[in-house]
Amino acid sequence: MSTPLQGIKVLDFTGVQSGPSCTQMLAWFGADVIKIERPGVGDVTRHQLRDIPDIDALYFTMLNSNKRSIELNTKTAEGKEVMEKADPRS
């Protein structure tokens, strides 16, 4: 069965609540959502309200299900190259 957004790729640079909720809905409708996170830090919600050490917080998991994640430094040449290759418009 196909989904409404099947074949659509979304690069998700959002964090905390509103953006991740929106991109999660896009993923639920079939978009390929790739969450871009800061190197060494990731999304701040990975660590907020964490119940179990070294496990992603439930808050993060609830907002980012059905997404793929990558840590990417978009300020380096290598990071820019990876981002350009992932860009659905390129």
Image (spheres, rainbow, N blue to C red):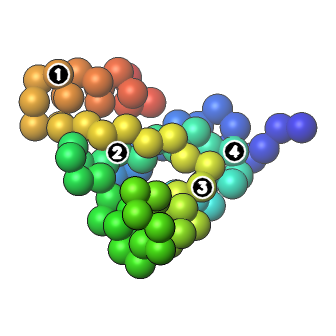
| Closer mark to the observer between disc 4 and disc 1 | 1
Tag 2 residue: 36
Residue type at tag 2: Ile
Residue under pointer 3: 65
In the rendered structure, which disc, 1 or 2, sits on the residue that comes first in sequence?
2
Residue 83, picture quadrant: top left
Compared with 87, 15 (above or below) is below
Q: Are marks 4 and 1 in contact (CB under 8 Å)?
A: no
Label 4, label 1: how far apart the Cα atoms are: 29 Å
Residue type indicated by callout 1: Glu
Q: Which residue is mark 4?
A: 30
Q: Is residue 13 left or right of residue 35?
A: left
Q: CA distance from mark 2 to mark 3?
A: 14 Å
Contact (CB < 8 A) between labels 4 and 3? no
The residues tagged by marks 4 and 3 sit, at their Cα atoms, a distance apart of 12 Å
- Identify the secondary structure beneath mark 2: strand
Which of the two labelled residues, at mark 2 and mark 3, occupies the earlier sequence position? Answer: 2
Whole-number angstrom distance, CA of label 1 to CA of label 3? 27 Å
**Residue most toward the bottom?**
49
Instruction: Specify the farthest residue to the front.
Output: 53
Give coordinates of residue 49: x percent, y percent: 41, 78
Q: Amino acid at mark 3?
A: Ser
Disc number placed over residue 78 in the picture, else none: 1
Evaluate if marks 1 and 2 touch, with contact meaning CB atoms under 8 Å apart.
no
